[in-house]
Image: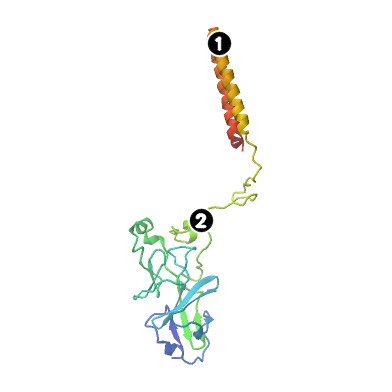
Amino acid sequence: AAMGLVGVAPGPAPPAAAAAAAVTEPPPADFSKICALEDLPRGDRKKVTALGKAVLLFWYKDTVFCIESRSPAEGAFSEGFANARLTQDGCIVCPTTKSTFELRTGEIKEWYPDNPFLKKLTPIETCRPMEVFPVLVRSDGVYVDVKNGSLGPDFVAPVGMGGSNTSLENNNVYAVEPRMYVEGEEDSSGASMAKAGEDKAKMDPGQVAITVAGVGALALGGSATCVFYENYIALGLLWLVGFGVAAKVSLDATGALDDDAN
């Protein structure tokens, strides 16, 4: 045969010797040359980016496969399949979840096999298949149809949103990205973050102590005078005013009124 189609093509894969036969025809229009055949030795994995997709190429049992470079079970912050284990039944293992994906079809074969809690928390239906790509191995190089992967020509794995939204399946429990703010910049809602030192100065602790002591002495003296003259109406007014002053001092000290105003 002049060329061999290996990877996700149907039927048994041709041996490497047949794939390296002489080339007399150009590759199909949608196939792009990724690397020379000698640049993909057995045992190595080659990660490249083509058409906005990060893909991984490697040999597996006399066949070159091309799959997406990260595990769909982990999301955008996956450590990737670069060092992932391959199984004897033609699957690759997600480094974190230990879920397995079929190399030829991308389908999920095992889902959280070692973690029944997460298996129940994030059912298999929440995860999409792994994207796989047609591969053409010829003596003049390794060609991949990156555009027409198993998930369709318009699919591109989303990246960079953080949390469970790091992939379409919304099942990423390993990448919770906290919202970050830079001092002086606006957040996503347009509200400006306060700069250091711009908050209103809170009351000095020494001033608070002196004020509290003065109010306490006034309350004690006033209460004694009112009781001596048996003027209980004045005593009630004194305590009412005293509690009001104490509340005002406390609010000034904590800055609660300023926070409510903002």
Residue type at mark 1?
Cys
Mark-to-mark CA distance, 2 and 1: 63 Å
Q: Residue at x 61, y 27 (%)?
A: 210
- In the displayed structure, does residue 42 sit left or right of residue 53? left
Density class for disc 2 (Cα within 10 Å; few <14, some 14-19, many ≥20) is some
Q: Quadrant location of residue 247?
A: top right
Residue type at mark 2?
Glu
Tag 1 secondary structure: helix
Give percent across and percent down for residue 19. Answer: 44, 87
Give percent across and percent down for residue 119. Answer: 35, 59
Please, is residue 134 above or below residue 227 in the view?
below
Q: Quadrant location of residue 104?
A: bottom left
Give percent across and percent down for residue 31. Answer: 51, 80
* Residue 65 vs residue 196, the one in the foreground: 196
Q: Quadrant of the C terminus?
A: top right
Indicate which label's residue lies in the foreground, 2 or 1: 1
Q: Quadrant of the N terminus?
A: bottom left
Density class for disc 1 (Cα within 10 Å; few <14, some 14-19, many ≥20) is some
Number of marks in the rendered image: 2
Q: Is residue 241 visible?
A: no
Give the residue at mark 1.
Answer: 226
- In the displayed structure, does residue 252 sit left or right of residue 164? right
Give percent across and percent down for residue 71. Answer: 44, 67
Give the residue at mark 2.
Answer: 177
Tag 2 secondary structure: loop
Point out the residue furthest to the right here.
Answer: 198
- In the displayed structure, does residue 95 sit left or right of residue 215? left
